[in-house]
Image (cartoon, rainbow, N blue to C red):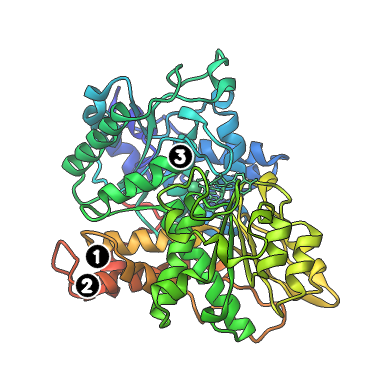
Amino acid sequence: MAQSESILNNPFLNKGTAFTNEERQALGLVGMLPSKVQTITEQTTQAYGQFQSKTTDLEKRIFLMNLFNENRTLFYHLMADHVVEFMPIVYDPVVAESIEQYNELFLAPQNAAFISVDDPEAIEASLENAAGGRDIRLVVVTDAEGILGMGDWGVNGVDIAIGKLMVYTAAAGIDPAQVLPVSIDAGTNNQKLLADPLYLGNRHQRIYGPQYEAVIDRFVTAQQKLFPEALLHWEDFGRANAQAILDKYKTKIATFNDDIQGTGMVVLAGILGALNISKESITDQRILSFGAGTAGMGIANQIMDELKQAGLTEAQAKQRFYAVDKQGLLFEDTDGLTPAQKPFVRKRSEFQNADALTDLATIVKTIQPTILIGTSTQPGAFTESIVKEMAAHTPRPIIFPLSNPTKLAEAKAEDLIKWTDGKALVATGIPAADVTYKGVTYQIGQGNNALMYPGLGFGLIAATAKVLNEATLSAACHALGGIVDTSKPGASVLPPVSKITEFSQTLAQVVAQSILDQKLNKEPIASAEQAVAAMKWRPEYKN
Ligand SMILES: NC(=O)c1ccc[n+]([C@@H]2O[C@H](COP(=O)([O-])OP(=O)(O)OC[C@H]3O[C@@H](n4cnc5c(N)ncnc54)[C@H](O)[C@@H]3O)[C@@H](O)[C@H]2O)c1
Ligand SMILES: O=C(O)C[C@H](O)C(=O)O
Ligand SMILES: [Mn+2]
């Protein structure tokens, strides 16, 4: 391909009609573009007009993804002006529709690396080819066994890695040329995909066990070799693999699991925000995790750490938790406990009606939780009667229905406010509109790890972190405090997405500082603030 053609097809370098006349001369682009040289502002206005002419969210998404594929700088320049409007389109919930229709809608590989369980020999070359010589600092990898709450989506799940990375750049300012989305195609147990002639992934059942683990290991080894300075972010792995992979690598490399740790962080930050409003203490809470899977147990561990810091012993802290899964309240003798659930189980002897504690209504009535968190993938599970029962025993019930996408949420924000007569302190997984009830406008926090992982990841990269530990996670959870004016009636428990670039920067600085304080940086760094500021990429054309 001629240089002129390749630069117009390179989304990291392309400026389209914004190439100046000098650049057109130098790059052999003369005559390949209409004569007018546009500014990025003009291009942005034009692109936004086109965006607005699309009628459905999916059409809007396809338009934006085409722009992303052509010209990353313009895409992010546009997104910077419309972050609240674009987040649900490029990320959750509309990303869910694009994953479901990936084969039909297939646009472009979007500079992702596609790794196949059937070809481990090709792993290193696949990463190298997809990176194309770019200086990769951030890798988001998924095997798509647990896409949001929608289960197994095989190779289609690559879109979540791409979506997460788009939020990283929009929120924290990671250079889009320094990121790499990775799909690990380990097969799929999704029968619909296996039967679909258009399916683009490996057409066989999902591989588990030693063969899978060897692929993961080979991937991590290649990633470390090719991009030793990169942070590795795991997304939407299945319940068993997510925790096991994190435990295997977290003390060796700079890595985190977003569903476990990112979610734990945003929920703890939301609880701290809620307690700021209610003026209650975290040590007085009874916490019910409904859906004790990857996210549910990540949340439990993050809150546990906070309770210990607040002065409780491990045993006292555990008494505050009630982990509920398919089997009901989890007891020592419950069948099928996961390793992550085991530390949080209760004794049957603690309850007079232990054998009846199999459904949420009875459990809520019995334990009278003050905090109810949903990561169960069970739509509508927080019913009116359950919520009213909870609210009867606590003045400001904290209720976070977090299951994504929209159709899986345990409750709607508006219902929670109404059923509790405005008392509930609410955060939801996807964006929720303000709720006006009896003259008060309630702002609903977005309890989505997207509020945390961009700042967390950016801070770790800027500080050249060796590893991520509990001290840094805890510091990050406290970093969002003070951004919301909690004295205002109807105040949100979390800061709004409209401020995501500001608070991601604060978060990144706190994270980088924590790494430096613990001497966990690989390279010498004079100041956390400077390191974060120096790494920030801005969506402007460079000469
Ligand atoms: N808002 C966020 O930031 C965020 C972050 C991570 C996950 N999530 C959402 O949380 C949900 C779970 O994600 P995950 O990664 O933990 O998945 P997971 O599969 O690891 O966990 C889901 C858990 O729910 C349990 N469950 C299923 N049916 C149940 C029932 N009837 N009653 C009680 N428990 C039941 C499952 O057994 C499992 O343990 C998804 O919808 C996901 O989108 C949201
Ligand atoms: O992707 C999201 O919206 C949040 C979270 O990581 C999830 O799996 O639901
Ligand atoms: Mn996820």
Left or right: residue 410 versus residue 106 is right
Whole-percent x, y for residue 503 in the image: 46, 70
For the point 53% across and 76% down, the residue is 272
Residue 112 in which image quadrant? top left
Circle 3 crowding by C-alpha within 10 Å: few under 14, some 14–19, many from 20: some
Q: Is mark 3 within 8 Å of ligand 1?
A: yes
Above/below status of 498 relative to 229: below
SS label for mark 3? loop
Q: Check disc 2 and give the amino acid type.
A: Leu
Which of disc 3 and disc 2 is earlier in sequence? Answer: 3
In contact (CB < 8 Å): disc 2 and disc 3: no
Give the x, y percent position of residue 60: 63, 41
Q: Which residue is label 3 attached to?
A: 238
Quarter where residue 508 is shown: bottom left
Residue density around tag 2, few if under 14, some if 14–19, many if 20 or more, within 10 Å: many
Q: Position of residue 388 (x, y in %)?
A: 79, 67
Q: Which mark is residue 516?
A: 2
Element type at mark 2:
helix
Measured as percent of width and height from the top left, residue 28 is found at 31, 32
Callout in the foreground (1, 3): 3
| Residue drawn at point x = 57 percent, y = 16 percent | 196
Tell me the tag on residue 463. 1
Q: Tell me if I can see residue 139 in this picture.
A: no
Toward the right, the furthest residue is 438
* Measured Cα–Cα span from mark 1 to mark 3: 30 Å
Q: Secondary structure at mark 1?
A: loop
Q: Amino acid at mark 1?
A: Ala
- In three-dimensional space, the C-alpha distance between marks 2 and 1, rounded to whole angstroms, equals 7 Å
Q: Nearer the viewer, residue 461 or 333?
A: 333
- Residue nearest the observer in this picture, 449 or 189: 189
